[in-house]
Amino acid sequence: MRMEFDLKLQQTQKLIMTPELKQAIEILQLNALELNELIQQELENNPLLEREEVEEDIYVVDVKELAKSIREMEKRMYYRDSDDEEMDEFNYENFVSAKPGLSDHLLFQLHITPVPTRIRKICEYIIFSLTPSGYLKEDVREIAQMLECTEEEVLEALAVVQSFDPPGVGARNLQECLKLQLLAQGNYKGIIKDLVENHLEDIAEGRYSYLAKLYNVSAKEVQKAVDAIKKLNPKPGSVFAPEAEGYIVPDVEVIKRDGEYLVLVNDSNIPRLRINSYYYSILESSDEEAKKYITSKLQSAMWLIKSIESRKETLYKVVKTIVDLQKEFLDKGINYLKPLTQKQVADILGIHESTVSRAINGKYVQTPRGTFELKFFFQSGLSSKNGKEFSAETVKNLIKKLIEEEDPANPLSDQKIAEILREKNINISRRTVAKYREECNIPSTLKRKRY
């Protein structure tokens, strides 16, 4: 066998992911809060980086006047000017306390309720075992074994906790939760009692006609009973849950001036960075190790500043393009939101689609129409018979409006909604209507029907 060796030259292109390029990509997809956190870390780790300090106004204070004001304030605080002028008495009610949690609320009621010491201890254990929604998920037998008491004592303690406010607290399941609330109202009787005990699933599925035949009553009577049940709170403990702070810091702001939309990248919370000039002098020293360290940190600092500026420029261009393409929505509202893809924006700007994806990732824009996630503007669409396109959000809005205006006694089926939209020249199938309706959390025809 003869072996031949051949030498060839071949030219290829490869994209090498340098650390700098990787950093630029990561920074591009950060929102304003995440970018601020990254900058704070870099300021701590890189001695060459420093923030540009904003000079604050200096106020001149008259020391004599200040001292006089302090003396007068002390006099008012500690002395009475006359017998007629009474100082406010110390009162705990003048202090604002934090909103009590579910455990605090229940423990307060327990402490003013006369119960035996042993039962009180079990009550405390039960209170601290409740879920944030107010349910007891631990088994009575397990609690008895844990506390070395009888199951009867646990049940007695549980009955005490279940008698507390809010009604329904301490329930072991939804059925018991609803029962406790209805008992507190004095309404746990008749068809309501039967429905809670045996037919919660039928209620959820909207089988009112079936229930009416089963109990030999009118569908309207079933509807009335169901309405009473739906007014109950399935999560009684949730009213004591700490309120989530759902603040959104928009990364971009769009404002209207003289009929034109201006795009402003929000960098008010992002520190301005610069290179500390002191370290340049070290580069002129003879210490090679120090020069090598400073050079490395200098390069890192410069790349960070450049990446932040690049992020700002890319974000501006992407949002400006979105605003230009969605101007009708900003002018007229949701029914004028156009279908849009990330590729369309990328092609207009001459950048890669993945760059657009990273630029809009997790970011919000504040507009005259409200604050939206940037992904909101990228909608799939449906075409009309005359070639006009409608965004999915526009179609959802039309479906919502049709359902809001429907006759509750004869709600529109998905097929009927599709037919109405086709009359408006929107080509849509029944299955797509059902999909959009579910995405809007709108129940089915059967569940919307009122008797």
Image (cartoon, grey):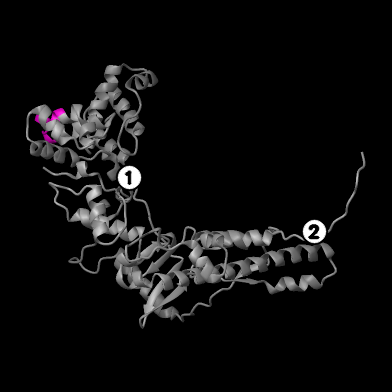
**Label 1 close to label 2 by CB (< 8 Å):** no
**Mark closest to the chain's N terminus, 1 or 2:** 2
Quadrant into which the N terminus falls:
top right
Query: Badge 1: how crowded within 10 Å, few (<14), some, or many (20+)?
Result: some
* Picture layout, residue 43 above or below residue 186: below
Inspect the image, locate mark 2, and give the three-letter code of the amino acid beneath it.
Answer: Gln
Picture quarter containing residue 76?
A: bottom left
For the residue pair 332 and 147, the one nearer the viewer reads as 332
Inspect the image, locate mark 1, and give the three-letter code of the amino acid beneath it.
Answer: Ala
Left or right of 8? Residue 187 is left
Q: Position of residue 89 (x, y in %)?
A: 24, 56
The span shown in magenta is: 184-194
Q: Residue furthest bottom?
A: 258
* Picture layout, residue 220 above or below residue 151: below
Residue at x 48%, y 79% (from the top left corner): 57
Query: According to the image, label 1 marks what residue?
Result: 241
Provide the secondary structure element on which disc 2 rests.
loop
